[in-house]
Amino acid sequence: MKSMRPMLVCSIALLPAINANASVKEANRDFFDVDLSADYKTTDNAKKQDVSFSPIDETQEIYRANLNAHYQDENLRILSDYSAQREIYQQQSEPDATRVLGHSLLELGNDYQPFGLLLLHDRTAFLVSPDAADLTINSDTREMLTLEPSVKKHMGTADSLVLTGSFTNISFQQEAQKNNDQKGVKAAWIHGLDQAENLTFSVQDMKSAFEFVPSADYRIELADAQYQVKLRRLEYSVEVGYNKATTINTSRDFSSPTYKIESSYDSGFNKIGVSLVQLIGDSSTVGSDSSGFGTANQTFTSSKGVGVDLINSRTASVNWLTRMLNERCTFGANVAQSVLSYQNLSEDGHRSTVGASFNYKLTRSSSINYRVDYQNQTFSADTGHTNFNNTRQRLSYNYLVTKGVDFDAYLQKESKNSVLILNRYVENIAGIKLSYHF
């Protein structure tokens, strides 16, 4: 089934995570996986503070249940990836917490039917401020629910017209001023050049209404063209257009070219992915990319801790995974850049990340893994935030105890550097983790 990409800016943040997760399992295969884990770790700096504040030693426990599922038949596709976790802090460095995070997709219809329906759900945690310490107490949770009905008309064997409506509700647990509803419509003409190539021309119109800040309501108009190729080892897509956003209260325009260039290559020994994206959105949706470090708390990579405003976002990333060095060895590297430019707020920022990983299989049942990540975040002079950089290193040993049961032991060091003493720290962590997969 050839799936249509979601039409609104809010959905762009959700779908890459779903699609990436599906590719791990080779999406044509149905599965229902459940993972249970217990993570027991000690830290010498539980509150992530500078040494002058007398850091707290603490034992922390994380109990997690993950559900990952895929089902597909001729008329239905379901993807789901959710995690429920309980976090216990024995010295009460922060309150114990329970969280449920994840995303799902339900799609009805196929290429040969005139009607279709797409339902998306996403629940994600973000830091409340871009330079806040990566603690659960410093995070907020955003929930997005999108409904997209569509009507399709085939014109011959190569051409189709598709009309899609979209209704999205976005809500935050803490930053309620960003709660909003987005409604829009998109018309697209799809022309199949052959079995591996197609062209798409589309126009769309979307309005966003904020529940508590009606002066921030805006409208987005977009026209673009996309060329897509899917070969056995190589896939790439080039999409270019123009984005015009208008604040309804003031009639101020915020416009720019838009593009989305993505490519992936899999030779068997090498996997390479490239992505270049520019788009206009708002502070409830833009900035939720996963190009940062990523943590067990799932809050390190980005932040929504700013006011309501339109944002021009530009991101670029390159990922490489190879087994060419040795059949026992897997090496990975990634580089990413992100630039956010706000229409009104003084929150402009630039983030650069680079990372590398090395995995070596010692025996059929055991392996060691080392990963290092570096992130540099800068802000424009008038934002009120402080520039910083982070480095994280993690060394782990994994042992397959028996089928479905894994044991991990790990050491981790994280450091954050900034001219502001409140924004720098060094933390050392040692832990063990037991996982059960069924």
Image (cartoon, helix red, strand yellow):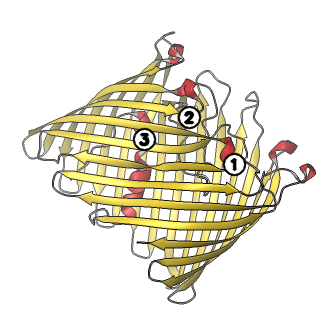
Which quarter of the picture shows residue 357? bottom right
Disc 3 target residue: 12
When the figure is inspected, residue 133 is found, relative to residue 145, above or below; the finding is: below
Residue at the image position 37 percent from the left and 28 percent from the top: 222
Q: Which mark is residue 173?
A: 2
User: In front: mark 1 or mark 3?
Assistant: 1
Residue 24: x and y in percent read: 40, 65
Which amino acid type corresponds to the residue marked 1 in the rendered image? Leu
Residue 310 in view of the camera: no
- Spatial separation of the CA atoms under disc 1 and disc 3: 26 Å
When the figure is inspected, residue 426 is found, relative to residue 342, above or below; the finding is: below
Other-residue count near label 1 (Cα within 10 Å), few / some / many at <14 / 14–19 / ≥20: some
**Secondary structure of the residue carrying numbered label 2:** loop
When the figure is inspected, residue 281 is found, relative to residue 11, above or below; the finding is: above
- Spatial separation of the CA atoms under disc 2 and disc 1: 16 Å
Residue 161 in view of the camera: yes
Which amino acid type corresponds to the residue marked 3 in the rendered image? Ile
When the figure is inspected, residue 371 is found, relative to residue 377, above or below; the finding is: below
User: In front: mark 2 or mark 3?
Assistant: 2
Residue 84: x and y in percent read: 50, 54
Which amino acid type corresponds to the residue marked 2 in the rendered image? Gln
Closer to us: 215 or 373: 215
Left or right, 9 with reference to 172: left
Closer to us: 147 or 256: 147
Residue at the image position 34 percent from the left and 39 percent from the top: 6
- Spatial separation of the CA atoms under disc 2 and disc 3: 21 Å
Residue at the image position 35 percent from the left and 50 percent from the top: 237
Other-residue count near label 2 (Cα within 10 Å), few / some / many at <14 / 14–19 / ≥20: few
Disc 1 target residue: 135
Residue 332: x and y in percent read: 55, 69
**Secondary structure of the residue carrying numbered label 1:** loop
